[in-house]
Amino acid sequence: MNGIRRASDMTKKIKAVGFMKHLPITEKDSFIDIDIEQPVAKDYELLVEIDGISVNPVDTFVRRDGQDDTSLSPKIIGWDAVGRVIGKGDQVSLFDIGDRVWYAGDFTKSGSNAAQQVIDERLVGLAPSNLTPSQAAAIPLVGLTAYEALFEQMRLPLTGNEGKVLLIINGAGGVGSIAIQLAKLAGLTVIATASKPASISWVKQLGADYIIDHHQDVVRQVRDLGYQYVDYCLNLNSLDLHFQAISELIKPDGHIVAIGENKKPIDLQHLKRKRASFSWEWMFSKSYYQTDEMITQHEILTHLSGLYQAEKLQVITQTTYSPINAQTMRQAHTDIESGLTVGKITLTGWDEQANY
């Protein structure tokens, strides 16, 4: 039988970073380098060769807090990605082979921590040509989250919001970094919170009109600025810690949007007399439930790409690790879990034998 290769031996393999068990990031096996079979695009899917990815807080939550199963297959997470289309299903109409694309993925699918990935074209946009892989990989998830929070949940128009005030709790993180910029382009006055010298400097650079400390009395600080109420609030931090202050500050008929989870019940009675509204933003909802609105993520990413092409938005990458492997992935997750990061962390490039 020497020299005879089985069909399974000839299946093309690609590099990936995954894990078998949900472990603390201090454990060496919290991430491992693995080889997996090359995925195949079908229907509306694109096959993307990935050049850059980023790590978000959701990555750390899923890796650390998920439930182990009995499967012998490694789990591959990761959502943000930028890369080149190398294959497509027979229903694809929005993209061609060779297109450079970016996207934030699908919570129900295998993730972007792999050299190649399949992704529904309705969740994908053309990446801006003037951004490097490190710069572009930082944007999709936080860009979609910020855009949907402001312009879908709060129903703000894209321009003409002068005189309206937006309070952003945690302005220095990834979502806050984009939300500040989009809000300023829309004409809003932005009050953003930051507490450390690095994050204060970063938020100021992004264009926030006022900066306050969310570890101090938020209500007093806002009112010391001359604002009894704010028209809108985007909460990107613990809702348990900040809902009382937010509900006191929100204007009658105002709108609160939150992305952070709460461990205690939220008492919406605080909003009743003001007729204020509250909504959650979860960027993965459209693909998770396969809604008709999935195509809007293609449209939003196309819009954001245009803003970057026109140099109307700043890049938000602060740290980049290379190449993409288990060691650099552990370092990126360690950084995120430290709570000291501003902007985004990205990883770029695979070794020369990423696909074989």
Image: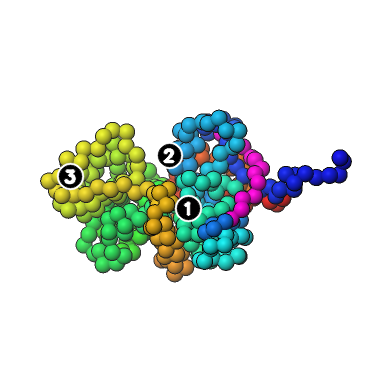
Is 39 in the magenta? yes
Is 209 in the magenta? no
Q: Residue furthest right?
A: 2
Rate crowding at label 1 as few (under 14), some (14 to 19) or many (20 or more) other CA atoms within 10 Å: many
Q: Residue furthest left?
A: 273
How many numbered marks have been drawn onto this rendered protein structure? Answer: 3
Rate crowding at label 3 as few (under 14), some (14 to 19) or many (20 or more) other CA atoms within 10 Å: many
Residue assigned mark 1: 104
Q: Which residues are magenta?
A: 30-41
Q: Quadrant of residue 144?
A: bottom left
The residue that appears at 61% across and 60% down in the rendered structure is: 87
Query: Residue 271 got which mark?
Result: 3
Q: Position of residue 256 (x, y in %)?
A: 25, 49
Name the secondary structure under disc 3. helix
Q: Nearer the viewer, residue 344 or 3?
A: 3
Name the secondary structure under disc 1. loop
Marks 1 and 2, how far apart at CA: 22 Å
Q: Position of residue 322 (x, y in %)?
A: 61, 48
Q: Which amino acid type corresponds to the residue marked 3 in the rendered image?
A: Leu
